Image (cartoon, rainbow, N blue to C red):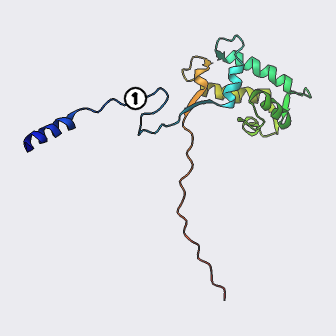
Amino acid sequence: MPILLSLVALIAAAQPEAPVEVRPGEPPEGVSAVPISETAEPIGLAIASFDADRDGRTSRVELNEALLRSFAAADRDGDGQLGYIEYSGWATVWLGSATALPGPYAIDADGDDRIAREELLAEFGRHFVRLDRDSDGAISHAELLTVSQPRLPPLPRERTPRRRAIQR
């Protein structure tokens, strides 16, 4: 009889467990999800908005034409250059924030506190090349997305009590 009970116990242990039910969008029990998100840089949002023919791709020609049109609109005093305050207004409209990157210091290549059309075109040209991942001369909306994991908060450091100096 003990041998029979041992065999039954072995057979029961060898039976596979019932399948775990996994619901779409939820990790299986015991597995923690790693949050991943797709985001677009502010410059990517501007480039996407410059898609004149609405084909989902922005060519270098569309980019340059839109930059020149928006530059002219932002150049309130008509001197052919944007001061940093004018650029701040331009960045608010086209990048979504006055503090969005690229900032005026990155664009102002000659450091004269003014942004010339050529400087704006050159800076956006560098970003265009960087974002055109397949190097086909146009940037698709998919190329503007960046897959990223959110930053986790830093681990707390162990605090060691500070020793107080004894004053005499």
Quadrant containing the N terminus is: top left
Residue lying farthest to the front in this orientation: 1
Q: Is residue 106 above or below residue 132?
A: below
Nearer the observer, 63 or 56: 56
Residue hosting label 1: 21
Q: How many marks?
A: 1
- Where does residue 66 sit, x and y in percent of width and height? 76, 19
Locate residue 30 relative to residue 1 in the image: left or right: right
Which residue does the image show at 76% across and 22% down from the upper left? 67
- Where does residue 111 sit, x and y in percent of width and height? 78, 40
Which residue does the image show at 17% across and 40% down from the upper left? 9
- Where does residue 160 sit, x and y in percent of width and height? 54, 69
Which residue does the image show at 70% across and 16% down from the upper left? 51
Quadrant containing the C terminus is: bottom right
Q: Is residue 117 above or below residue 9?
A: above
Give the secondary structure at mark 1. Answer: loop
Question: Residue 55's image quarter?
Answer: top right
Q: Residues within 10 Å of mark 1 (few under 14, many from 20)?
A: few
Nearer the observer, 101 or 71: 101
Locate residue 63 relative to residue 136 in the image: left or right: right
Nearer the observer, 76 or 96: 96
Q: Amino acid at mark 1?
A: Glu
Residue lying farthest to the right in this orientation: 77
- Where does residue 85 sit, x and y in percent of width and height? 85, 36
Which residue does the image show at 81% across and 19% down from the upper left? 69
Locate residue 142 relative to residue 27 in the image: left or right: right
Question: Residue 90's image quarter?
Answer: top right
